[in-house]
Image: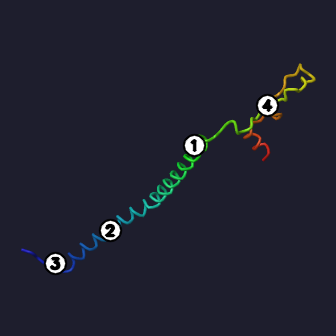
Amino acid sequence: MNVDHGIWSKLTKVVVGLIVLAVLLLIGMCYLPLIQENTRMRAQILKLDQQIQTEQKKSTNFNPKSRRCATTRKPSNASPAKNSATPSRTKRSSGLNPRQMRRHIK
């Protein structure tokens, strides 16, 4: 025996379906910013990986003979230092490394 309750049973099914759809859309909207951030981070990781590869290629092509040494060489005919009691300083006069120098200048 099928009893027809009229439009109310059909209307109830439609409302329940719309509520389920609204809940699913709400969950999707909550996770959308997280998904977008994940996409941006993955793109940044790919970009940084490419930069790492190019820097590694540059470092393998590096020829130490082509770069000038940081220390200066004395000419072979140079006279000895006037005051031989004081050791010659090979470090910078300020005693700071380049990173500290940049901070000090700023």
- The tag earlier along the polypeptide, 2 or 1, is 2
The relative height of residue 63 versus residue 76 in the rendered view (above or below) is below
Residue to which mark 1 is pinned: 56
Q: How crowded is mark 1: few (under 14 residues within 10 Å), some or many (20 or more)?
A: few
Mark 4 = which residue?
Answer: 91
| Figure coloring | rainbow
Q: In this view, does 74 lie above or below 12?
A: above
Label 3 vs label 1, nearer the camera: 1
Earlier residue among tags 3 and 1: 3
Residue 22 lies, in percent from the top left, at 35, 68
Disc nearest the viewer among 4 and 2: 4
Residue with the most extreme top position: 85
| Residue 67 circle label | none
Is label 1 in a helix, a strand or a loop?
helix
- Label 3 close to label 2 by CB (< 8 Å): no
Which dot marks residue 5? 3
Disc 4 or 1, which lies upstream in sequence?
1
Dot 3 falls on a residue whose secondary structure is loop
Q: Where is residue 49 in the image (x, y as percent from the top left)?
A: 53, 48
Q: Where is mark 2, residue-wise?
A: 21
User: Which mark's residue is nearer the viewer, 3 or 4?
Assistant: 4
Tell me which residue sits at (78%, 32%) in the image.
71
Query: Where in the figure is residue 26, as x and y percent of width and height?
Result: 39, 64
In space, the residues marked 3 and 1 are separated at their CA atoms by: 75 Å
- Front label number (4 vs 1): 1
Q: What residue type is labelled 4?
A: Lys
Q: How many C-alpha atoms fall within 10 Å of the one at disc 3: few (<14), some, or many (≥20)?
A: few
Q: Is residue 92 rendered to the left or right of residue 37?
A: right
Q: Which amino acid does label 2 sit on?
A: Leu
